[in-house]
Every structure is written in C-alpha cells, then in structure tokens.
Image (cartoon, rainbow, N blue to C red):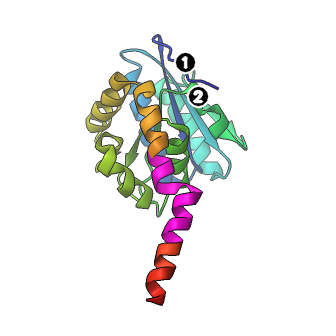
Amino acid sequence: RNYNPDSSMLRMIVVSNLRRIKNIEFVLGLVKIVRLDRQVQLDIYYANYEKEYLRELKLQTKELGIEDSVHFIHNETEPQELFYKYDIALHPSKRESGPLTILEYIAQGIPFVAFNTGQSVELIQKKFPEFTIDSFNEDEWLINMNAIINTGRLNYQKSLKQFFDQCYSLDNYYTECRRIYTESLA
C-alpha cells in the first residue's frame, strides 16, 4: 500500500522487543514533548517482552498523560506490512549488534531516528546522517526528527529502497560472496 501523509497527525512507530535495554521509555518522553505542538500517534509493535517492563511503560504513559496517543500492539507477525501508515520510525535501543528492525525500515522506505549502535546503523549514517544520533538528549532527537519530517517520508522512500537494494539485495550478496571466494582462491 502507498503511504499517505496526514498533516493533522504525526504517526510514529517502534518495532521492538520490550526489554529495558531497548529504552522504549525514552520514546514515551519524546511523545510527551511532541504532543505539546501537534497531535501524535505512537504504535509500539512487540512480540517478546518483560512483563514488569511492559507494566512500567503502560504506567508511564498514564503518568505522562499520553495513554490516548500510545498503542501497544502485541504479536503482529508482519508489522512491516503496516509501515505505510507511518511518517517516521524510532529505534532507541542502547545496544544492538545488527538490528533487523533498521533493515526492515530501510527496505520499506520509512525514515527513522536510531541511537548509533550496531552494524546497520553504521552503514546508514554515511548516507543519511540525520537518521542516527549519539546521545539520548531529547532536544537532539527532536531536531533530527523534525529535519526528517520536514523533508518528508516521500522524499526518502525511493533513496532508502535503492540503498537497501544496493547493500542488501540477494544479487549483491551473491556477488560479494563470490568476490570473497575468488580472492581466497588466489
């Protein structure tokens, strides 16, 4: 399906397991700030979770007064099929090795802001430096988010998909494997 922007609402997504290292509470704080200026919707898709952490996140949404803006969506098996609904994705995890969620965002052409951790983030930050950030300073995240939102998802979609095909397509993977194999025989 095609992405359709909605100027009256900022639609954000997080796809993550709900564990403390994923730092989802940071995004809830961002929602509180963004809501001061505009309507916002945050959908958090998750499968695996720590019960106590989920309870704390839901309590935090109530304490911040954002429970009507935040939706916890459990066990959606194909969230990438719903990415067309969103303006921007967030990935606040404090530690990752090679987050597959980032690859899904790239493949589906959805711009994002992610904490600078993991191999996928290293690759993307050279081409899209506004997508990565080295701190958990809310102002810095909001600056990057606003830059992306002002540019618009539609302006990123094609280049993100091309980037994915260039870096992660089966043909490129095969070519790279063949190059390594050929070099090792030489």
Q: Which residues are magenta?
A: 163-177
| Residue carrying label 2 | 84
Amino acid of disc 2: Tyr
Q: Is residue 47 above or below residue 82?
A: below
Name the residue that disc number 1 marks.
Answer: 4
Q: Is residue 171 magenta?
A: yes
Whether residues under marks 1 and 2 lie with C-beta atoms below 8 angstroms apart, the answer is yes
Kindly identify the residue that appears in the image at 42 percent across and 41 percent down: 26
Residue 117 drawn at (x, y percent): 38, 57
Location of the N terminus by quadrant is: top right
Q: Is residue 136 visible?
A: no
Q: Residues within 10 Å of mark 1 (few under 14, many from 20)?
A: few
Magenta-span inclusion, residue 14: no
> Seen from this angle, which residue lies furthest top?
8
Q: Secondary structure at mark 1?
A: loop
Q: Is residue 79 above or below residue 102?
A: above
